[in-house]
Image (cartoon, rainbow, N blue to C red):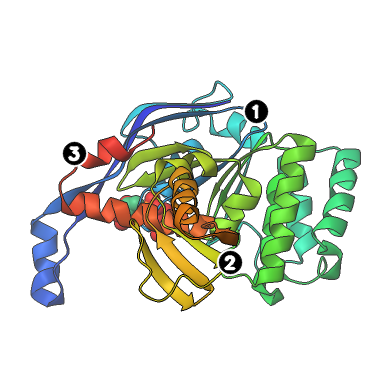
Amino acid sequence: MIEVEEISKVYTQFKRSSGVLGAIKNLVSREHTLINAVNQISFTIKRGEAVGYLGPNGAGKSTMIKMLTGILVPTSGKVTVNGLVPHKHRHEIAKKIGIVFGQRSQLWWDLPVEDSFELHKRIYKLNDAEYRKNMNVFLELLSLKDFINQPVRQLSLGQRMRAEIGLALLHNPEIVFLDEPTIGLDVTAKDNIRAFIKQMNLDRKVSILLTSHDLKDIEEICPRMLIVNKGELIFDGTVDHLKSNLSMEKIITIEFVIDPGHDFEIENAVIMDDYGIRKTFKINKGLNSAIDFIQSVSKRYPIKDFTLQDSDIEDIIRVYYRSLEDVSANGSNQQKQMSVV
Ligand SMILES: Nc1ncnc2c1ncn2[C@@H]1O[C@H](COP(=O)(O)OP(=O)(O)OP(=O)(O)O)[C@@H](O)[C@H]1O
Ligand SMILES: [Mg+2]
């Protein structure tokens, strides 16, 4: 459905000097730097898959979405969406895809929301029955009925995003690209939008490519994640896959039968909290070693109970991003070793 083969995008950024002299200088000299926003990335996405596209600011996520939707032409490499090259077949592709940019509106600012939908219906040549069917679903599920007659400029951010998402799905696209669809929204609005996207993915088998800095979006909608950093793809897999590839810190609380005392010491762990009979440890290994750790403690001190606090996706990604920073500080060789791609 989506095939990306060694695709790259290099931007040319011209240096601009300020002031009057600078303006004159800008006219004569064209000093520039090249930015490798996307660097030789390959992946495929199948029909009905929901994939999260993650990475720190400036990693090249929006650039990738723009190439996949035909807005930008790649510098090199191959992209096909449904067998078509996006920037060469923008009209054909447009019928198959929906796009939501959290930072940019596709609605007509001064017109009532419904007018943008009517216009979209004509552009995409939807028949009345299809239009009504989808509108009825969106009026309910996205609660568009609350503001369908209001001009877009009067909408709250949450209402506008609901309208944007409905509009992107109106023509029954097979793939939807969402670039930060929940940016700036409150918790309830985010939940509603996530639930809707997920339902469209499951019920209509719409493929999803979603970028977001809110990892809950990815966790709830996308079983698969692609992580990019500085233009390169560094991970392709599931959250569990990522977890098992990182040595995460584990927090274990153990309740002893009797207090082992304060001079209690054990290898591979630091005591974080000590309430005598109940102590909390931080161990610096994966799940297997957590079990090893409990076994080795219980050999010496009888244990009544224990709890293992698992890291959530936020922690995992934080550790992952931190490890990337360490890698770039120590040269790039290690990065290849860490990557799972
Ligand atoms: N039109 C452009 N001209 C020149 N450089 C650009 C252009 N668009 C993006 N860039 C640069 O390319 C790099 C990747 O930008 P991009 O917007 O794709 O990142 P992103 O991963 O979407 O970041 P964010 O999480 O902040 O949205 C950045 O260094 C950015 O400054
Ligand atoms: Mg972006």
The tag earlier along the polypeptide, 1 or 2, is 1
Q: Amino acid at mark 2?
A: Val
Residue for point 38% across, 69% down: 264
Label 2 environment density (alpha carbons within 10 Å; few <14, some 14–19, many ≥20): few
Q: CA distance from mark 2 to mark 3?
A: 48 Å
Q: Is residue 8 left or right of residue 110?
A: left
Report the front residue among 268 and 263: 263
* Residue 96, above or below 283: above
Q: Nearer the viewer, mark 1 or mark 3?
A: 3
Residue for point 60% across, 55% down: 217
Q: Which mark is residue 333?
A: 3
Give x and y (percent) for residue 198. Answer: 72, 47
Residue for point 61% across, 29% down: 92
Question: Considering the numbered disc 2 on the image, is that residue within a helix, a strand or a loop?
Answer: loop
Q: Which residue is mark 2?
A: 257
Q: CA distance from mark 1 to mark 3?
A: 35 Å
Report the front residue among 319 and 235: 319
Give x and y (percent) for residue 201. Answer: 71, 40
Q: Which residue is mark 1?
A: 47
Label 1 environment density (alpha carbons within 10 Å; few <14, some 14–19, many ≥20): some
Kindly tell me whether residue 26 is visible in this rendering.
Answer: yes
Q: Specify the quadrant of the image occupied by residue 128.
A: top right
